[in-house]
Image: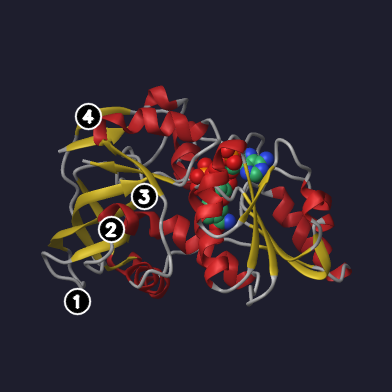
Amino acid sequence: MRAIVQDRYGDARVLRLADVEVPTPGRGEVLLRVRAATLDASVWYKTTGRPVVSRLAFGLRRPRERVAGQEVAGTVAAVGPGVEDLTVGDEVFGVAAGSFAELAVARADRLAHRPAEVPPESAAALAVSGVTALQAVRRAEVRPGQRVLVTGAGGGVGTFVVGLATDRGAEVTAVAGPDKADLVTGLGARHLDYTREPLASAGRHDAVIDVSGNRPLRDLRHSLSARGTLVLVGAGVTTSGFLGGAERMLLGAVWSPFVPQRLRGLTSVTRRDDLDTLASMVATGHLHPVVDRVCPLEQAPAAVRELGAGHARGKTAIVP
Ligand SMILES: NC(=O)c1ccc[n+]([C@@H]2O[C@H](COP(=O)([O-])OP(=O)(O)OC[C@H]3O[C@@H](n4cnc5c(N)ncnc54)[C@H](OP(=O)(O)O)[C@@H]3O)[C@@H](O)[C@H]2O)c1
C-alpha cells in the first residue's frame, strides 16, 4: 500500500511516499481503509524529533513508527481478536498511528462511529484537535456570558476552542495573526491581531485558554480576572529546547496553589465518549470544523512543511 514514511528526524524532506506492507491488526485493534487523515502539531514534532522530550514517545534515535499521521476517519476493513463493538464496513474516526496511508491500524477504543452527516475530513479533525479543545473548554469551566481569551485561535485546536466556547454562550476574544480576522469572526469571536495589538488591550477575562503556547505566564495571567482560570494547552509549534515550552505547565502547577487565579495544564486523551459528543455537535450544527484544505497523499510532505511554519489555518486534510 502507499504511505508517507520517515526513517529519520529532520525537516519535511524526511517524509516521502513509499510502498509498505499492509499492517495487521492485533488484539483489540482494527484495520482501517483510510478515507481522510488530518495534520496536527504532533505530526511536526514527530517529523523533526523536537522538542527532544517527544523522542521518549516517538523513538530516541529514529521514529519507531515509520508511517506519519495520527488523526483518521476510515472504513473498518478487518477486525483483530477481542474486538466486539466494531465490524467490517463500519464508518469510524479517531486515532490511528500511521494514518497518512491507504490502510492503518487503530485501537478500537480510540475510535467512534462516524455519523453520516459528518464528512470524513471533518471527523478526522475531531480526533485530537477537537478532543483537546473540548477538554480545554471543560477544564476552563467556560459558562454562558463569560469573557474568554483564546490564543492560537486560528489553528487546528484553536478554531475548535473558539467554536466550543461560543457554543457555550461565552464572549470570545480570538488571538490570531492578521490574515485570520474573517476566520475567527466567522466562528463568532472578536479578533485580536497579535501583530498589532498587545494582549493586555483586550482587558481581563474569566478564562484564558492558551493554545499557541508562546507567551510568558505573567502575560497570560495579566489577561485574567482576579479569580479567573488559565488553561495551558500549547507548547508552541516551532518549538525548541528539551521540553519545548512544556515547562510553563510545570511552572503553572507549582504556582497555582499560591495565587487566587487557577493555573491548569492539560494533557488531552482521546476517548470514545468525547469523540461521540463532538460528532453529534457537528451533526446537529453546533460545531463547525474548519478544514481549510484537502490534499492528495503525495502532497502530505508539503502540507507538513507548511504546518511547521507555525501559522496553520484550521485543519489540513490528506486523502489517500
Ligand atoms: N496539551 C495537549 O494535550 C495538546 C493536545 C494537542 C495539541 N497541543 C498543542 O497545542 C498547540 C497548537 O496545536 P495545533 O494543532 O492547534 O497547532 P496549529 O494548527 O499549528 O495552530 C497553531 C496556531 O497558532 C497561531 N499562532 C502562532 N503564533 C501565535 C501567537 N503569538 N499568538 C497567537 N496565535 C499564534 C498560528 O497562526 P497565526 O500566527 O497566523 O495566528 C496557528 O494558527 C501545539 O503546541 C500542540 O502541541 C496540546
Instruction: Tell which circle, 2 or 4, labels the residue nearer the N-terminal end.
Output: 4
Please state if 196 lies on the left or on the right of 150 as rendered: right
Q: Which residue is mark 1?
A: 84
Please state if 137 lies on the left or on the right of 89 as rendered: right
32 shown above or below 240? below
Q: Which residue is mark 2?
A: 106
Q: Mark 1 near mark 4, Cβ–Cβ under 8 Å?
A: no
The residue type indicated by label 2 comes to Ala
Q: Mark 2 near mark 4, Cβ–Cβ under 8 Å?
A: no
In front: label 3 or label 1: 3
Task: Report, in whole angstroms, how far the alpha carbon at label 4 lies from the one at label 3.
Answer: 18 Å
Instruction: Tell which circle, 1 or 4, labels the residue nearer the N-terminal end.
Output: 4
Disc 2 is placed on an element classified as strand
Q: Which residue is mark 3?
A: 70
Instruction: Tell which circle, 3 or 2, labels the residue nearer the N-terminal end.
Output: 3
The residue type indicated by label 4 comes to Ala
Task: Report, in whole angstroms, how far the alpha carbon at label 2 lies from the one at label 1.
Answer: 14 Å
Instruction: Tell which circle, 3 or 1, labels the residue nearer the N-terminal end.
Output: 3
Disc 3 is placed on an element classified as loop
Q: Residues within 10 Å of mark 3 (few under 14, many from 20)?
A: many
| Residue appearing at x 39%, y 33% in the figure | 303
Q: Nearer the viewer, residue 283 or 53?
A: 283
Question: Where is residue 42 shown, x and y percent of the image?
Answer: 48, 45
> Which quadrant, please, contains the N terminus?
top left
| Residue appearing at x 35%, y 44% in the figure | 69
Please state if 213 lies on the left or on the right of 102 as rendered: right
Q: Which residue is mark 4?
A: 18
The residue type indicated by label 1 comes to Glu
